Image (cartoon, rainbow, N blue to C red):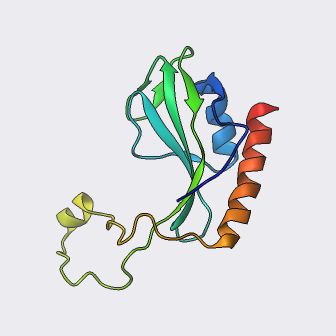
């Protein structure tokens, strides 16, 4: 994990205002959100192993429902953005079970290393994406 300094850090803003900027810049609300916090994630590579992640806390209101809706009064404050890299086991899962039901329940394998070292080129790409997002959110 590599933390990145950002103009977004400690910025408090209505969730409804930032959500459209996030969508336009290729960020999605990570699946590990809760009513009072979450992460906006953007893959930096084509295989979803290197990510730019921006954490946030809900300061007013809450995030609700499967569609992750927030009322107009919901506000968030950004934490420190960071880059992370996941390493997955390549090839066939020798212990895997097959079947239609099993594939519905267990679609994704856990990373072998959820905090693998990040190569320098990803830092440059992340900086570019972060600056684009800062411009969209702040200006």
Which image quadrant: the C terminus? top right
Q: Where residue 16 sits: x, y (%)?
A: 60, 25
The count of marks equals 0
Instruction: Reply above or below: 48 against 4.
Output: below
Q: Where residue 122 sits: x, y (%)?
A: 66, 67
Q: Residue at x 60, y 47 (%)?
A: 81
Q: Residue furthest top?
A: 73
Q: Residue furthest right?
A: 139
Q: Where is residue 62, by image quadrant?
A: top left
Q: Residue at x 65, y 36 (%)?
A: 9
Q: Residue at x 71, y 49 (%)?
A: 130
Between 99 and 66, the residue placed more toward the observer is 66
- Whether residue 38 sits left or right of residue 100 in the image: it is right
Between 43 and 127, the residue placed more toward the observer is 127
Instruction: Reply above or below: 113 against 54.
Output: below
Q: Residue at x 61, y 68 (%)?
A: 45
Q: Where residue 37 sits: x, y (%)?
A: 44, 33
Q: Where is residue 43, by image quadrant?
A: bottom right
Instruction: Reply above or below: 68 against 39.
Output: above
Q: Where residue 23 sits: x, y (%)?
A: 63, 43
């Amino acid at each position: 994990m590599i933390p990145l300094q950002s103009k977004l850090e400690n910025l408090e803003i209505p969730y409804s205002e930032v959500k459209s900027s996030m969508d336009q810049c290729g960020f999605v609300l990570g699946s590990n959100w809760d009513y009072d916090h979450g992460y906006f994630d953007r893959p930096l590579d084509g295989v979803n192993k290197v990510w730019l992640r921006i954490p946030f806390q809900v300061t007013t209101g809450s995030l609700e429902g499967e569609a992750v809706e927030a009322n107009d009064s919901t506000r968030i404050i950004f934490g420190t953005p960071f880059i992370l890299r996941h390493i997955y086991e390549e090839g066939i899962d020798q212990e895997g079970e097959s079947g239609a039901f099993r594939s519905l329940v267990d679609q994704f394998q856990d990373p072998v290393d959820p905090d693998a070292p990040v190569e320098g080129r990803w830092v440059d790409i992340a900086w570019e994406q972060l600056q684009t997002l800062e411009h969209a959110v702040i200006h």
